[in-house]
Image (cartoon, helix red, strand yellow):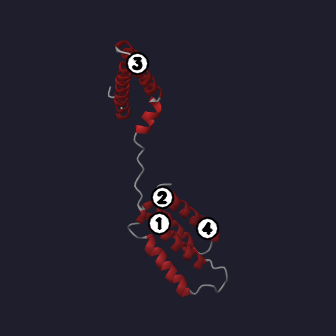
Amino acid sequence: MKSPLATRVHLMITFVLVTCGAVGGACLGFLLSGRLMALAFAGAAGLGAGIGARLSRRQVVALLRPAPAIPPVDGYAEGLADAALLCIATYQAAVFPLTPDGVTEEERRARRHIAYRISAYDGLPHPVQTSAAAALEAIDHGLDAERAEAAMKALGITVYDHRGGR
């Protein structure tokens, strides 16, 4: 069985730390009192480094483990989805104006044309395209404002779900 890379790296780090600790302890013991003290200091320093590495194993392996992959963000598609939502919302405001004579027929046609053009754009993600088509269908009937509002809410949720990096 092949152990994960993070575990192998930790094992190599532990080996180096224990070796350096033992050599450093041996040098210090030899300088202080001779061969017997060098052996005792080398054993104590190596054992201490090994115990410390063993106790910190879980944290070190978690630190060395690669982060999960984040899907790439397509900012262009996100911008198109936001623009489609905005254009369809302005078309909805033209079909269901707050005042009876608030929008001229020419303005309504222009907003409809723009909303349909951006909703049919190839760069727009497919789920947003289908949700936009449903919203445009509900708005085009122009009879039920609640149905159009529900379709716009669904479109907003679809656009939000399509955003990456959240």
Would you call the spot at circle 1 few (<14 residues within 10 Å), some (14-19), or many (20 or more)? many
Whichever of callouts 4 and 3 sits on the residue coming sooner in the sequence is 3
- Which image quadrant for residue 60? top left
Whichever of callouts 3 and 1 sits on the residue coming sooner in the sequence is 3
Give the left or right position of residue 159, taking residue 122 as reference: right
Marks 3/1: CA distance?
Answer: 68 Å
Q: In x, y percent, where is residue 68?
A: 42, 44
Marks 1/4: CA distance?
Answer: 18 Å
Whichever of callouts 3 and 2 sits on the residue coming sooner in the sequence is 3
Marks 3/2: CA distance?
Answer: 62 Å
For badge 4, the amino acid type reads Glu
Marks 1/2: CA distance?
Answer: 8 Å
Marks 4/3: CA distance?
Answer: 78 Å
For badge 3, the amino acid type reads Phe
The residue beneath circle 2 is 162
Q: Which mark is residue 149?
A: 4
